[in-house]
Every structure is written in structure tokens, then in C-alpha cells.
Amino acid sequence: MKKRDKIIYWVLTIFLSFGMLAGGIQQLLQIGGYNEIISQLGYPLYLLSILGAWKILGVIAILSPKQPLLKEWAYAGFFFAMSGAFISHLAVGQSFAEAIPSLIVLIVTVLSWYFRPANRKLEKQ
């Protein structure tokens, strides 16, 4: 792996981890405006606790040095959560600008997954 790719991976992964951890804690505790956002999207408030817990566990999985299969599941979970959030904003008629944060985190998720080092990938069989 090139040094450039390793730097890209860690910058993206740290950004992703910080965002998911901060959001996950706020969602788990239902603070920081998430109640209003989730209500506007038409989802029940208890969904925040579920998403928050899974985001925190996903960050732990992505940052841990082992468990490549668990990392794949965490990235998949982040992808589904962020693509679902992006689509939800648009589906309820909110402006594209309100959906941009979800889209940014979705793109960062995909790029972090793409640039991950070989020792963080599943072995090809």
C-alpha cells in the first residue's frame, strides 16, 4: 500500500469514526437536535437509541486491529444508515441542502472502505 493511500485511509477513517461516535452518543442519549430531525423524517424516537448503539459498536469494529469480517459488517451498516438518512431527507420533501451531511458521511464511508489496508480486508479465497 502506498503511503499516500494509507494517509487517505486514516484521515477518512478518523473523520468517519469521530462523526459516527459523536452522532451515535447523541442519538443514544437523544440529545443534540436528533429528536426533531427523526420526528420530521417520520421515524419513532426509539430508533435513535438503536442507531446510536450500533454506530458506537461500528466505530469500535472499524478501529480495532483485527476482525476483518466485523469491519465489513460495520462499513455495511454505516452505508445503509447514511444512504437511508440521505434518501429519507429527500423522500419527505426536504431540500437537498438538508440531505448533504448524510451524503458526505456516506461518501466518506465508501472511501474509507475503499482505501483500507490489506490487513483490514477479508482474505480472498
Image (spheres, grey):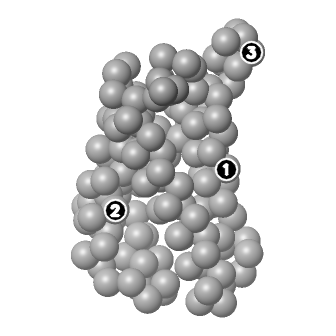
Q: Helix or strand or loop: what does disc 1 sit on?
A: helix
Query: Which residue: 48% across, 27% down?
Result: 125
Looking at the rendered structure, the kind of residue marked 2 is Leu
**First along the sequence among labels 3 and 1:** 3
Does 5 appear above or below 41?
A: above
Tag 1 residue: 107
Q: Which mark is residue 91?
A: none
Does 106 appear above or below 97?
A: above
Q: Nearer the viewer, residue 114 or 58?
A: 114
Tag 3 residue: 4
Tag 2 residue: 51
Q: Helix or strand or loop: what does disc 2 sit on?
A: helix
Looking at the rendered structure, the kind of residue marked 3 is Arg
Query: Which residue: 35% across, 38% down?
Result: 70
Furthest-front residue in view?
Answer: 125
Query: Which quadrant holds residue 57?
Result: top left
Residue 31 percent coordinates (x, y): 33, 65
Q: CA distance from mark 1 to mark 2?
A: 19 Å
Query: Which residue: 42% across, 78% down?
Result: 38
Q: CA distance from mark 3 to mark 2?
A: 33 Å
